[in-house]
Image (cartoon, helix red, strand yellow):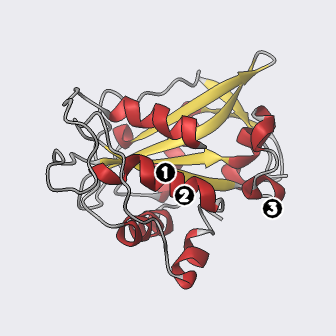
């Protein structure tokens, strides 16, 4: 399976805010600034569940997901992207989305946090995530049952080989340190509005060292 809780969503959204518009809360998209692209955040679920015990009882941890998608975040100049519009999905779509975003409450909180800056309704937004996820090819090391050491350059090269249209600067890696050991927790991919990959903005950075640990998928 390819595949933050509320506070983490807020943290990521702030990274993509390029300037403060100071225009207040938008319940519709009429006055929202144009979206300049998107960043899809893929979490390494075993690592996230290991490092954050508060997440250990979430469905993605209990059911042994290898990866999950934390969200598709807009690159926008808006400083406030909340919306009161519904995040409800049809039963069939909710089932499909759950394959990559298993926690329903997290999906609802995500939409209510960023939906005001996205020129789509919730159904279109989550359908876009599914489309991007299905297109992305994942190196086998990220879903391996064995914990292993990996060089950043080698993992990037594998992504590029599996996804020929992915530019080298369209993918970023993030790590967290546990007992002095860096562990891969996130992969970020940058997109144009039309879904094509693009160079990541300066706000999307890689904090992993030259090598790190990939936690086994249970």
- Report crowding for label 3: few under 14, some 14 to 19, many 20 or more residues within 10 A (C-alpha): few
State which mark lies toward you, 3 or 2.
Answer: 2
Residue 139 in view:
no
Task: Looking at the picture, tell me which residue is in the foreground, 79 or 52.
Answer: 79
Residue at x-position 19% and y-position 35%: 23
Q: Which mark is residue 63?
A: 3
Horizontal placement of 142 versus 134: left or right? right
Residue at x-position 52% and y-position 79%: 93
- Residue 171: which quarter of the image? top left
Name the residue beneath numbered marker 1: 110
Q: Position of residue 107 (x, y in %)?
A: 54, 58
- When the figure is inspected, residue 153 is found, relative to residue 99, above or below; the finding is above
Horizontal placement of 73 versus 61: left or right? left
Residue at x-position 74% and y-position 39%: 47
Q: In the displayed image of the protein, which residue is found farthest to the bottom?
A: 92
State which mark lies toward you, 1 or 3.
Answer: 1
CA distance for labels 1 and 3: 21 Å
Q: Quadrant of the N terminus?
A: bottom right
């Amino acid at each position: 399976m390819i595949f933050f809780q509320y506070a983490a969503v807020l943290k990521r959204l702030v990274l993509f805010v390029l300037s403060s518009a100071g225009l207040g809360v938008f319940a519709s998209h009429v006055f929202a600034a144009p979206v300049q692209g998107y960043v899809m955040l893929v979490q390494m679920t075993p690592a996230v569940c290991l490092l954050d015990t508060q997440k250990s009882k979430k469905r993605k941890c209990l059911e042994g997901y290898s990866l999950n998608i934390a969200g598709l975040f807009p690159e926008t100049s808006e400083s406030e992207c909340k919306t009161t519009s519904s995040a409800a999905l049809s039963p069939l779509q909710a089932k499909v989305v759950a394959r990559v975003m298993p926690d329903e409450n997290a999906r609802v909180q995500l939409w209510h946090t960023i939906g005001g800056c996205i020129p789509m309704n919730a159904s279109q937004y989550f359908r876009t995530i599914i489309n991007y996820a299905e297109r992305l090819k994942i190196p086998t090391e990220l879903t391996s049952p064995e914990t292993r050491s990996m060089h950043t350059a080698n993992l990037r090269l594998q992504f590029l080989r599996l996804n020929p249209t992915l530019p080298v600067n369209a993918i970023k890696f993030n790590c967290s340190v546990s007992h002095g050991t860096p562990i891969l927790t996130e992969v970020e991919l940058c997109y144009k509005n039309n879904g094509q990959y693009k160079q990541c903005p300066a706000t999307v950075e890689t904090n992993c060292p030259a090598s790190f640990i990939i936690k086994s998928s249970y």
